[in-house]
């Protein structure tokens, strides 16, 4: 029997990862590694399987000692963690198999992998295992055809501890009929959505129920309504199962904004137990939406179409979570205030605002490449890095981005709780979805969140809870959960600002130092004193970064190393040295800065 170790690398902190709220919610990670668990169900019985989700637990040497092979599945943002996993496996002499969206698009850039199983795995993975057993496995397996997902087996949820996660995941469909310029979904999964059967979905629900799961269940479709007919065919089966089991799952999914025009689908979703949907809103700017090929978000006859669409979905009973992008072609400096106003007016507590990224393989990437606007910057780790030249001044764009997120997730959380109250005012309560919570559990939740908030946040929190208790008492459990998420959003926003502020300070310090050492009369003693003072300031700022704000590939240590090299270069020839014809020595402080603990 072969021992197959399935490893899911770390995610860096993100809005979606709710990292700073996990402890309050009593879990270790937001979502399980659904793709890896689906692949696990494709192994024949002669394999002994073990899953290590590095977002939940460490990858120990004992795991590697046990393994005959390591199998990984990764997104782009997990790139740095995957690199370290591969290094450890190479050092231990364990073959590595890599798949998932990141290797599918970037396998030529990934070193140390023995076998790549790319694209969707239903057809290629069993073939790879057969070839492996027969000693003729190839390095790369690809499948140009999209597999029939009605043959996709039930994921191996039994290989993880469900209690570690905030929500479980299942998948109904793959693909999206729209072709937004910046999105790689259609390149990976096609524009003709393929769906599982109602019987498959019931079987996956049943598998989770038997394992004891109760609570949030995320249907991770690229666009749940991409195939409207099949969605309408599947939803009654889910509704029947939910009714028979007392609605144990609170469902949410991803969809396009035109869901608001599908009353029959929304009604069926409500009956099935959906109470939330994530929409790719992107921007309230119609010009930018048109350029990025997002016609489903535009209505020439209805100027407030996006806001009205969100209201309609909320009034049906589903909370709207929104994705927003800054840096689109067609945006100007007015977009920052427009984003803030729209998010506040719409009542979207969970507003995930990000800078545009040109992903390899997308139409946007191809267009920017033809316009010579791409930059050689790695994607997927730093939330403040641009890998292309935007139409807007990059400095203004970055400053505006930080202002938007620092406003909607302000330090006092006043704006955040205002959006929560707007949502609860507009949201139609769904008695069949709202879980029953004891008074003691409510009190525990209230106090758990309160203890985590800063003194400046408690007044807004107290007013918010008092208002919900008076006007929306049945929604108090959800209000507490939203408050916990608000703590995460504000802290992650502050984390981005602190890390970017440190990098900006290095650039400012370097500019000032270069000017100082280039002045006439800047002799060796003056440069030496300035160098010592400079490194003392940098060291102090470095140490002031909170330890829980640091993560792998946050760019801080690379920025410091680059700063040191630039300072040495600036110091290498002072005016006095030039007159003497001798180079000056290195800066007094040259050892690496210790990371804060």
Image: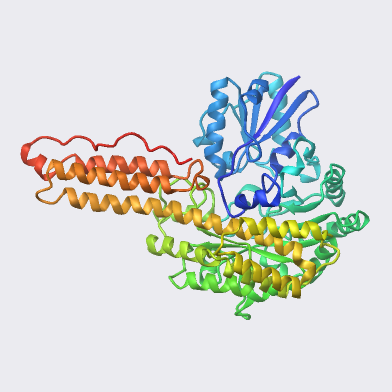
- How far from the left and from the top, in percent, is residue 278? 67, 61
The image quadrant of residue 212 is top right
Q: Is residue 59 visible?
A: yes
Quadrant of the rendering where the N terminus is positioned: top right
Residue found at x 86% / y 49%: 202
| Farthest-out residue, right | 244
- How far from the left and from the top, in percent, is residue 508? 30, 54
- How far from the left and from the top, in percent, is residue 292? 53, 63
**Eyeballing the image, is 84 above or below 388?**
above
Residue found at x 49% / y 63%: 328
Residue found at x 65% / y 68%: 462
In this view of the protein, which residue sits in the foreground, 198 or 554?
554
Residue found at x 75% / y 71%: 469
The image quadrant of residue 130 is top right
In this view of the protein, which residue sits in the foreground, 156 or 423?
423
- How far from the left and from the top, in percent, is residue 550? 49, 45
């Amino acid at each position: 029997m072969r021992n197959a170790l399935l490893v899911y690398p770390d995610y860096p902190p993100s809005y979606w990862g709710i990292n700073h709220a996990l402890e309050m919610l009593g879990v270790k990670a937001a979502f399980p590694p659904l793709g890896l668990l689906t692949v696990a169900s494709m192994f024949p019985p002669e394999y002994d399987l073990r899953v290590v989700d590095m977002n939940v637990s460490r990858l120990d040497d004992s795991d590697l000692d046990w393994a005959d092979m390591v199998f990984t599945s990764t997104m782009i943002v997990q790139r740095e963690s995957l690199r370290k996993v591969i290094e450890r496996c190479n050092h231990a002499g364990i073959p590595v198999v890599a798949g998932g969206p990141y290797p599918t698009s970037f396998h030529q850039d990934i070193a140390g992998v023995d076998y790549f199983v790319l694209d969707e795995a239903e057809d290629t993975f069993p073939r790879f295992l057969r070839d492996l057993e027969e000693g003729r496995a190839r390095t790369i397996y690809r499948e140009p055809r999209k597999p029939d997902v009605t043959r996709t087996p039930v994921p191996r949820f039994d290989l993880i501890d469900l209690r570690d996660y905030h929500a479980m995941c299942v998948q109904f469909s793959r693909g999206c009929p729209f072709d937004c310029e910046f999105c790689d979904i259609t390149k990976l999964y096609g524009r003709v959505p393929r769906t599982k059967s109602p019987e498959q979905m019931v079987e996956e629900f049943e598998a989770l129920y038997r394992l004891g799961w109760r609570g949030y269940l995320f249907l991770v479709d690229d666009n749940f309504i991409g195939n409207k007919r099949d969605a309408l065919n599947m939803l009654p089966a889910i509704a029947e199962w939910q009714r028979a089991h007392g609605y144990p799952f609170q469902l949410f999914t991803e969809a396009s904004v035109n869901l608001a025009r599908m009353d029959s689908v929304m009604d069926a979703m409500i009956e099935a137990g959906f109470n939330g949907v994530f929409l790719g809103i992107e921007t309230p700017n119609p010009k930018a939406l048109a350029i990025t090929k997002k016609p489903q978000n535009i209505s020439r006859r209805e100027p407030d179409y996006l806001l009205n669409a969100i209201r309609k979905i909320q009034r049906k009973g589903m909370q709207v979570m929104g994705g927003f992008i800054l840096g689109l072609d067609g945006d100007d400096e007015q977009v920052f205030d427009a984003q803030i106003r729209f998010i506040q007016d719409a009542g979207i507590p969970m507003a995930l605002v990000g800078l545009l990224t040109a992903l390899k393989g997308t139409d946007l990437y191809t267009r920017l490449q033809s316009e010579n606007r791409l930059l050689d910057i790695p994607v997927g780790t730093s939330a403040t890095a641009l890998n292309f030249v935007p139409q807007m001044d990059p400095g203004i764009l970055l400053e505006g981005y930080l202002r938007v997120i620092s406003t909607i997730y302000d330090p006092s959380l006043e704006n955040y709780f205002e959006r929560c109250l707007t949502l609860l005012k507009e949201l139609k309560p769904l008695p069949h979805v709202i879980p029953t919570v004891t008074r003691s559990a409510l009190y525990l939740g209230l106090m758990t969140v309160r203890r985590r908030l800063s003194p400046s946040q408690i007044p807004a929190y107290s007013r918010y809870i008092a208002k919900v208790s008076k006007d929306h008492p049945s929604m108090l459990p959800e209000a507490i959960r939203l408050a916990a998420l608000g703590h995460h959003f504000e802290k992650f926003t502050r984390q981005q600002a602190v890390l970017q502020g440190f990098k900006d300070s290095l650039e400012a310090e370097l500019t000032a130092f270069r000017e100082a050492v280039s002045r006439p009369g800047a002799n060796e003693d003056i440069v030496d004193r300035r160098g010592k003072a400079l490194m003392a300031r940098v060291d102090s700022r470095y140490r002031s970064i909170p330890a829980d704000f640091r993560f792998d590939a946050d760019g801080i240590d690379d920025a410091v190393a680059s700063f040191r090299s630039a300072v040495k270069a600036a110091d290498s020839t002072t005016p006095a040295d030039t007159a003497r014809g001798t180079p000056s020595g290195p800066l007094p402080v040259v050892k690496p800065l210790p990371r804060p603990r």
